[in-house]
Image (cartoon, helix red, strand yellow):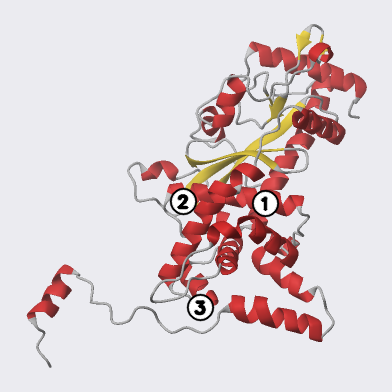
Amino acid sequence: MAMLGCSQVRNLVFGRRRSRRFWSALRGDGTWETDFLTNYHVMGVEWRVPDFEDEQYIVHLRLGKTEFWRLHDLYGLYLVTKDTRWRCAVASHKRLAMTLHWLAHGYTYSELARVYAVGKSTAVEMVHSTVTILLQRMVKKSIRFPEGDELKRVMLEFGELAHLERCAGAIDGTFMKIKKPHIPYADSYWCYKKYCSIIILGTVDACGIFTNVNAGRAGSAGDAAAFSTSKLCRKIGSRKWLTIDEGDERFVIDGTYIRPYLVADSAFSLCSTTMKCYDEVGVLPAYRRTFNHRLIRTHRVVEQAFGRLKGRFHILVDNNLSDTDFASDVALVCCALHNICERWNCPLENSWLVDDSVYNMYRPGPDDQPRADFDQAGYLVREKMARVIHQHHPVA
């Protein structure tokens, strides 16, 4: 057996990396070059199946071919990188496709690198840089809280949906499963569902489009805590959001002005801008049962939106992410892409939906702190609204 030299022993003892023997491995074409850009197109033309190629884009990237290249036209410019002395840069459309594929299927970086015929470190770099660029360029344009005339339109659509007047959005939260982070107080990310997670708190309009998203709070915190520290709560409290200039057409019931509000579940506290169901024990009066029925039908919109979100992007269901900041960025980008898919009418296959995904929302756990049931203003608003709604649209 050959004896090891001093330098070799030193490398073994101290874990020093070996000197680089070659700059990059020789690789062939991956699925992007062979399938998306060549095979699917040729096969569709040859077999006179024009939608075959489009179906492959939808299955793998969640966007049709037209929608993918439309998205690339909007943000591909920011994904362009320069060639180096040692290798050519990866094309911007391949970087975008790799990131969408990763978000849609929750692949590990090794699996993604193998499918697209790149190195693992290259796959990691491309995913992280693309997510960062989409976060900076796309999220603010795609996720916008309604104001002015847009707010009036949202309230009108919610009113037509379930006859719940003045509703400006439905708010709820869901868990994004992650690996235990390597940070102090990592145990706080352990939620009552018995895994580590961050909370995605989302508000949607009547069409299931996200109008505000807050992501990153530890899974043990709960929806109410995430809401109380969010930008949404600050904006509403300072009357910058959920405020509308109505002039002499103010919506008043028995002398009480009804401000636009969000509908929520039992995890939230009742106030004039956050309505939730009556949850008293026993038989409720008819007008309260009507209000509960209308609110539950309205709140269902956000639960269904989260179900479609997780169906499209399985990275939110299972992944190997332990960096909570990056996981939060991924959640925001997925919500923005969900909005794009909804607005561009991209199909959603039932086979994508995760079991129990629609109902995998946050629910008050055994360790949650009790919340005040209501404040006086919120109670008064809910009582007057419930009576008026029952008078005009009673539930049998």
Residue located 69% across and 28% down the image: 262
Against 320, residue 32 (above or below) is below
Element on which disc 2 rests: helix
Indicate the quadrant containing the C terminus: top left, top right, bottom left or bottom right.
top right
- The residue singled out by tag 2 in the image is 326
Mark 1: amino acid: His
Against 185, residue 390 (above or below) is above
- The residue singled out by tag 3 in the image is 117
Label located before the other in sequence (2 or 3): 3
Q: In this view, does 262 lie to the left or right of 314?
A: right
- The residue singled out by tag 1 in the image is 338
Q: Is there CB contact under 8 Å for labels 2 and 3?
A: no
Mark 2: amino acid: Phe
Mark 3: amino acid: Ala
Q: Is there CB contact under 8 Å for labels 2 and 1?
A: no
Label located before the other in sequence (2 or 1): 2
Element on which disc 3 rests: loop
Q: In this view, does 45 lie to the left or right of 223?
A: right
Label located before the other in sequence (1 or 3): 3
Kindly report the distance in space between the C-alpha atoms of the residues bearing marks 2 and 3: 24 Å
Q: Is residue 195 visible?
A: no
Against 215, residue 90 (above or below) is below
In this view, the residue farthest toward the bottom is 1
**Image coordinates for residue 20, horizontal then vertical, percent:** 27, 77
**Image coordinates for residue 349, horizontal then vertical, percent:** 75, 62
Kindly report the distance in space between the C-alpha atoms of the residues bearing marks 1 and 3: 27 Å
Indicate the quadrant containing the N terminus: top left, top right, bottom left or bottom right.
bottom left
